[in-house]
């Protein structure tokens, strides 16, 4: 910020800050949050999306359907475990 005295610049002050570390920490935090969200959305054993994730995506698709006023179909499948004979 220049300081002028009688229309003549007498002093200039410049501040430089290195934000590399803060930027790297922010990126690491965002990646950790994304990973935690992925783990929360999936079953730990099977890796299949859980009901909470299903309901979230269903809400998104329902909103999209309302916005575009189109047709919507849904197929729900409940697989049964294989049984040994």
Image (cartoon, grey):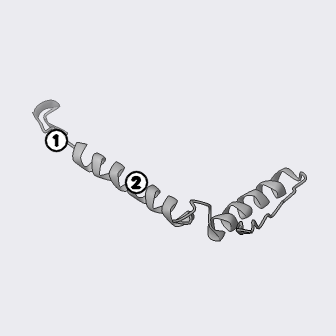
Question: Does any portion of residue 82 appear in the rendered image?
Answer: yes
17 relative position to 54: left or right = left
Q: Which residue is denoted by mark 1 in the rendering?
A: 15
Is 84 displayed left or right of 10 in the figure? right
Label 2 neighbour load within 10 Å: few <14, some 14-19, many 20+: few
Q: Earlier in the sequence, mark 2 or mark 1?
A: 1
* Residue shown at 75% from the left, 57% from the top: 61
Q: Name the residue at the top extreme.
A: 8
**Quadrant where the C terminus lies?**
bottom right
Q: Provide the residue designation for mark 2.
A: 30
Above or below, 24 against 76 in this view is above
Instruction: State the image coordinates of residue 1 (x, y, percent, origin top left).
Output: 19, 39
Q: Nearer the viewer, residue 50 or 30?
A: 50
Q: Position of residue 15 (x, y in %)?
A: 16, 41
Q: Residue at x 29, y 46 (%)?
A: 24
Q: Quadrant of residue 65?
A: bottom right
- Asked if residue 65 lies left or right of residue 36, the reply is right
Examine the rendered structure and indicate whether residue 27 appears above or below residue 84. Answer: above
Q: Closer to the observer: label 2 or label 1?
A: 2
Question: Which residue shows up at 13% across the image and 34% down it?
Answer: 6
């Amino acid at each position: 910020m220049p300081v002028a005295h009688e229309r003549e610049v007498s002093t200039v002050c410049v501040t430089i800050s290195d934000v590399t570390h803060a930027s790297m920490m922010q990126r690491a935090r965002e990646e950790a949050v994304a990973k935690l969200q992925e783990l929360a959305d999936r079953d730990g054993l099977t890796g299949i999306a859980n009901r909470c994730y299903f309901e979230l995506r269903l809400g998104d698709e329902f909103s999209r359907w309302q916005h575009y006023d189109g047709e919507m179909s849904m197929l729900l499948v409940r697989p049964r475990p294989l049984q040994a004979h």
